[in-house]
Amino acid sequence: MTLAAAAAHSAHSGFLSPTGIEIAFVLVGIATLGAALVTVTTKQLVHAALWLVVALGGLAVEYLLLTAEFIAWVQVLIYVGSVVVLLLFGLMLTKAPIGRSPDADSGNRWAALGVAVAAAGALVWVVVDAFRTTWIDLDGPAQGSTEVTGTFLFRHWVLPFEALSVLLLAALVGAIVLSRKRSKEQS
Amino acid sequence: MNDALDVALRLVIVFAVFMVLPLVVGQTEHKVMAHMQGRLGPMYAGGFHGWAQLVADGVKFAQKEDIVPAEADRRIFQLAPAVALLPYLLVLVAIPIGPSEGAVGQIVDAGIFFVLAVMGVGVLGSLMAGWASANKFSLLGGLRTAAQLLAYELPMLLAAASVAMAAGTVSLPGILNAFEWWWLPWQIVGALVFFVAGLAELQRPPFDMPIADSEIIFGAYTEYTGLRFALFLLAEYAGIVVLCGLTTVLFLGGWHGPFGADGLGWVWTLLKTAVLAFVVIWLRVSYPRLREDQLQKLAWTALIPLALAQIALTGIVKVAIN
């Protein structure tokens, strides 16, 4: 969206003017936050993983409401479809009990809370600072379609993209090295 | 008002397809398996060649007592069948069956990602059932499901990515619009990888290790009875319909056919889907179950390299054409 159009659009949209989509956005946000809180406070391990599904799904819905369709489905595909399945696999391998796990507690909870609040604060501050005056026209054509996302990613952000792939490759190789080393010690 | 009516009509049609086609596949499986094994299969329910057998089964399931084991995690145990079944209903909305705009429930811009993402959610149902049943066999079944899913999700994604590269779009109607007949030999390896990985994701024979009845009774579904068990079975057959439909749309050209593509496109889609569903049933009758290590080996040493080779081939041909 060009600057002029953005300015024209922001002129007739007040801060948090309650259109239907914005109300839905806030409601889904509250639900997502609630699910995230339950995830970290529940004493039942597998329930925590399933609440994480709800939280991640809520995030995907938020992306959809912001017309970033591609990001939303990738979010579901990667996080709900793969990461949570991996988590559940791990929990099943360790025979997570049904019911409460009394030892599912950590002495670091206050430090963890501090780190979480600091990280959330930093993220919120950065996002608010970066997009303070940007408005998306939710009724117009999708701003976050696959085509737009792909063009942006591979035209303007191709270097960070490649750097990320190298980073992931390094992590992969590292994981293989670590797992092989341990098996040698055992034998 | 007209829009609302249109949306409601589409949803009703998709729901009807969702209720009918899996039952048709199930009944076909009864009859085809029986004839391949020198039997007749169901002959009495409904009169003509036992066509109403699955309806009778449904009535039977609805009458059974709904039991939740005492030690089970009640809520998750009861929620699991819904989590397993609903994703397939959502996927059906995005599969186009004909060339016109009206022949798809809802055009999704990132169609491939949508269908694969939502299908991945369905497997959570088996995992939830496996864990919440408080039963060793169920837990083993859940574990095997998770291991199988982790191995076969990647080749499936890579094969689908190859088609998306060939078409230059990730929307399902867009892929069909770009389809040419020579894509069939060009993408054949990807098609095989996609179909095999999809079978494994559905836990159909020969990939039915997670529900191997001679070892772990019925895996994650061991403790289920009545309607909830029927929902899991329905999810399996809905999964067959979705997988065959997706393979048709992505690799076999969907509504394209030698003739009559304008008016009869949907017939071609249904025909190709039916042939694939028959292959699924045929495989169940003819192949022995793969062992767990064979499963993993097939995925990591055969399917993933094949899928990567297909992507390389797609890229080379694509660049050469341009």
Image (tube, rainbow, N blue to C red):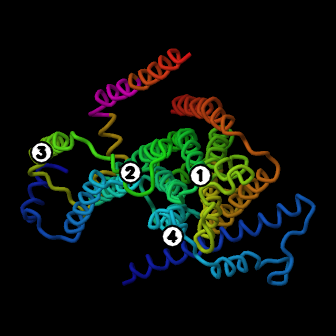
From the image, tell me which residue sits under label 2.
Answer: A45
Tell me: A166 left or right of A128: right
Chain letter of disc 4 in the image: B
From the image, tell me which residue sits under label 3.
Answer: A121
What is the number of callouts on the image?
4
Are the numbered discs 1 and 4 placed on the same chain, yes or no? yes
Q: How far apart are marks 3 and 4 (CA)?
A: 47 Å
B261 shown above or below A181: below
Q: Which amino acid does label 4 sit on?
A: Gly
**B244 inside magenta stretch:** no
B266 shown above or below B157: below
- Among the 4 quarters of the image, the one containing residue B240: bottom right
Q: Is the magenta stretch mostly helix, strand or loop?
A: helix
- Is the C-beta separation of discs 2 and 3 under 8 Å? no
Could you tell me which residue is drawn at 8 percent across and 55 percent down?
Answer: A7
From the image, tell me which residue sits under label 1.
Answer: B136
Are the numbered discs 2 and 1 placed on the same chain, yes or no? no
Q: What residue type is labelled 1?
A: Lys
Q: Which mark is residue B294?
A: none
Magenta stretch in the rendered image: A155-169
Query: Considering depth in this image, is B50 or A54 the residue closer to the camera?
Result: A54
From the image, tell me which residue sits under label 4.
Answer: B102
Query: Considering depth in this image, is B207 or A71 the residue closer to the camera?
Result: B207
Q: Residue furthest right?
A: B38
Q: How far apart are marks 2 and 4 (CA)?
A: 46 Å
User: Residue A151, position in %: x, y?
Assistant: 33, 40
Q: Distance between the residues labelled 1 and 4?
A: 48 Å
Tell me: A80 left or right of A163: right
Q: Distance between the residues labelled 2 and 1?
A: 18 Å
Q: Which amino acid does label 2 sit on?
A: Leu
> Secondary structure under badge 3?
helix
